[in-house]
Amino acid sequence: MPNKVDNNKNFPDIRKSDELYKIALDLIPATTQTLAKGPQQNVRGIAPKYLQRGKGSHVWDVDGNEFIDFNMGIGPLSLGYSYPKVDEAIKKQLEDGITFSLMHPLEVEVAQLINEIVPNAESIRYSKSGADVTSAAIRVARAYTGKEKVLCCGYHGWHDWYISVTDKNLGIPKTVEDLTFTFNYNDIQSVKDSIDDDTAAIILEPFVFEAPKNNFLQDLRKLCDENGILLIFDEMWTGFRIALGGAQEYFGVNADLATFSKAVANGMPISILTGRKEVMQVLDEKVFFYTTFGGEALSLAAAKATINELKDKNVPEYLANKGKLLKSGYNEIVQNLKIDYSKCIGYDCRSLITFDPKAGNPLEMKSLVQQEMIKRGILWGGFHNMSYSHTDDDINYTLNTYKEVLPILKKAVEENNVKGYLKGEPVVPVFRKVSNFNTKPKLKTVK
């Protein structure tokens, strides 16, 4: 029988997952559409590779194994799988149609909602993926300022302007690479050292897991104002999660442009570009940013229902409260076990388990914990991506599971044999780097 959310005797049977994966190896480059969902992010040979369905905070793989999910679609499931009010909105709209030959009223209705909730969202445009709107924001910034260079910090999608600064930049012209540079988070001096009189925009994730320090975001705002640079917040993770109005509301810092996706539509594909009307007006005529599916009605219906539910149920507060139980609970467990090489960091709504290399290979330690969590019915990638569907029972079960699993990690570390405890291949690093990543342009004039 398939494994349940329980202290299962055996690791899950994943034969159907492996059969599908074998076919995918011949048909789909890299086998996955998103690196964070790929098999390299899980212990191969132990973890399922394909999920079949989800309900609330639980998922079932193609072999029928059940798990509590703390990945939540890599972010979009802010309310949970198959959330009734969102599903009802999608079904109702489906009766009328999906994509039309003229604009749809939902384009206006959702824009009004966002305008009311998101600071500085004086103008709103839609697309489908986060990369679409971050790239649109860069194009808008260049058009508005008449400048070309960009400074970035965080992860901003697959398009040329950003990927050019990474080690996955094959296929991108050198002329594009020469226009994007990076700075270190919480290091205002690295920004000052990099800007020049051709810098159009500074784009960053307002935070990933590390909190801003010493008024970093406020100082960025001031620096941009002083140098005629547009400040762009990439709020794929923070938007509608850390607060209803995202990081701009939470930290009291307004960006000139802000981009959103993930949490806003509970899994339906939509992304949003917002900003000051004065800046966004270049989209009226001068800048081309259009897509056939930007006004697709099912996603807009889902976004409307999701935003209303996030607002009516005060979901950001719920995420923080429940996430805090996991974060503080984990840290209490490792403290009691005298495990000083692991801790849970980040904001309560989305926290991260870290492993200190002083105790061994961090990826092997993470893999061992993941392996044992999966055996006990928890789909775990080292994160607590909280949703409104995560219950107290889920949290209590997860903390009790940590109490079972972490002593296994401790024993393996003490024996200096973490790899020997693994039943499959360990995970590999996910593509993301946000520190010690400062590349500077040749400076012209710095104000």
Image: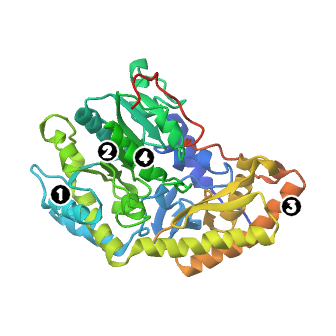
| Observer-nearest of 230 and 25 | 230
Label 3 to label 4: alpha-carbon separation: 45 Å
Vertical placement of 404 versus 108: above or below?
below
- SS category of the residue bearing label 2: helix
Q: Residue furthest left?
A: 102
**Which residue: 42% across, 59% down?**
76
**Which residue: 34% across, 61% down?**
264
Looking at the rendered structure, the kind of residue marked 1 is Glu
Numbered circle sitting on residue 411: 3
Q: In which quarter of the image is residue 370?
A: bottom right
Label 3 to label 2: alpha-carbon separation: 47 Å
| Badge nearest the viewer, 3 or 4 | 4
**Marks 2 and 4, the one that precedes in the sequence:** 2
Count neighbours of disc 4 (C-alpha within 10 A) and say few if under 14, some if 14 to 19, many if 20 or more.
many
| Observer-nearest of 395 and 85 | 395
| Observer-nearest of 447 and 352 | 447
Looking at the rendered structure, the kind of residue marked 3 is Lys
| Badge nearest the viewer, 2 or 4 | 4
Q: Residue furthest top?
A: 174
Looking at the rendered structure, the kind of residue marked 2 is Val
- Residue 355 as seen in the image, left or right of residue 223: right
Label 2 to label 4: alpha-carbon separation: 21 Å
- Relative image position of residue 353 (x, y in whole percent): 65, 59
- Which residue bears the numbered disc 4? 220
- SS category of the residue bearing label 3: helix
Numbered circle sitting on residue 107: 1
**Which residue: 20% across, 56% down?**
98
Residue 183: tell me if it is visible. no
Q: Quick check: marks 3 and 2 in contact, CB under 8 Å?
A: no
- Relative image position of residue 2 (x, y in whole percent): 62, 67
**Marks 4 and 1, the one that precedes in the sequence:** 1
